[in-house]
Amino acid sequence: MTTRLDTSIETWGRVHRGAHQLAEPAWRDAVAEAARATAAAAGTTLAHGLGRSYGDSALNRDGGLVRTTGLDRLIAFDREGGILRAEVGLSIDALLRVTVPAGWFVPVTPGTKFVTLGGAVANDVHGKNHHVAGSVGRHVRRLALWRSDRGVVECDPEVESDLFSATIGGLGLTGIMLWVEIALHPIRSAMMQVENRRFADLDEFFALSEDSADWPYTVAWVDTIQGGEALGRGVFSRGRHAETGGLEPHRSGGPTMPINAPSLLLNRVTVGAFNRLYHANPGSAFRGRRHYDGFFYPLDRLRRWNRLYGARGFYQWQGVVPPADARTATRTLLDVITRSGEASFLAVLKNFGDRPSPGLLSFPMAGTTLALDFPNRGERTLALMAELDRVVSQAGGRLYPAKDGRIPAAAFQLGYPSWRELERLRDPLLMSDFWRRVAISDGNGG
């Protein structure tokens, strides 16, 4: 297996980057050789897909990476029953081009279709329908992974159930996944019935969430600039698959952000102006039909949109707090942000449902989640996120590993008390920057 040193691999947030010994197998039976070859120099390796993790969970700096995007074949598709088995490098983008014309949709999708099936399972991704469908792990029927100590292992909720549970949301540490079998969601149309509604404050957000329990997809954009009586104002969006309208999948293409934007492009003034326009524009009160691509994946319209944050990149932060303290904690989080002077361009607010995942370290829990982006301004940005961390921890919540690149080990372990079980089941050849930081470097791992 040919490997090469790649010094350009970075996270989607572009704050974390480093050199890796890289291999790109084209066939499942080449994965073992690729893993051992990339680990030869530094002793560890890690699977890597399309690189959409914002933090350091998909990096293994100065170690090995096995890029799985060449493992992108459809293995089997039951068009009557909606059961699909595919290699882990298949993207949601490619998957939907096959399944939508047949009347099936992914059961759960994150905010971008440019993620691999394996990456979605490894991070146990959630979406706008968590309150009714839970995370993607609830829809995984079976999977296969290669382990350095056992070879190829197939597992499901009844066979190798502990390994199955640890792999869902296991950040790619239990073995290199080879294929996943998943149950799809039936649709009659590629169109969505959508309603957008403005809300004036946080109380109105919670009222709209309660009023939208019969809508399968809900999410809100929230203004993190306005304080006072307007604290938590935003736009609430809800949708459902339309009954008519054809089954045409999304189109490819779209413009690409060609260069890094000036580092000061996204600041409090420019984001504040955008927020005022967004909250007041007619689209914020839209009611009608929209293709699924525009509803689920608005950011995909601009390729390499992460360059908008400049060469220094940006941090993503996402936390969830349980229902008992959700209103108070969410209000405190927004108040901390508005007082900080920092501007979050992409601020998303949603209520999770009580839909537990089979995943050992799954992020979603019943409660309210807030996802934010912050341009990297060094210590002031890190200090702000540390304050947000404290609010979440005090409320009994936790942070999302797929978004994180700096949470201390103690905070992670508090939010994920089952982390030791994942460490027990971790493949000894696999490691990531994230796991080294939160479970190994403090001496608690192993």
Image (cartoon, rainbow, N blue to C red):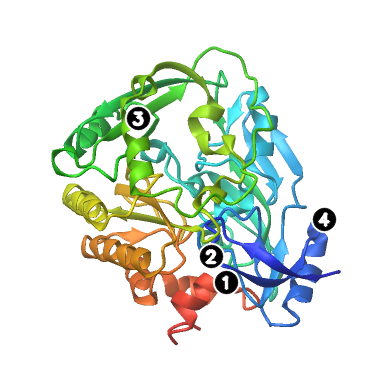
Please provide percent x and percent y for residue 237.
Answer: 36, 29
Q: Which residue is mark 3?
A: 277
Q: Is residue 268 visible?
A: yes
Residue at 60 percent across and 43 percent down: it is 182
Q: What amino acid is labelled 3 in the image?
A: Leu
Mark 1 burial class by Cα count in 10 Å: few <14, some 14-19, many 20+: many
Label 2 residue SS: loop
- Contact flag, marks 4 and 3 (Cβ < 8 Å): no
Dot label at residue 57: 2
Label 1 residue SS: loop
Label 4 residue SS: loop
**Looking at this view, is 86 or 307 the one in front?**
307
Q: Is residue 352 visible?
A: no
Check the picture and name the quadrant holding the N terminus. bottom right
First in sequence: mark 2 vs mark 4: 4
Task: Tell me if 246 is positioned left or right of 371 in this view.
Answer: right
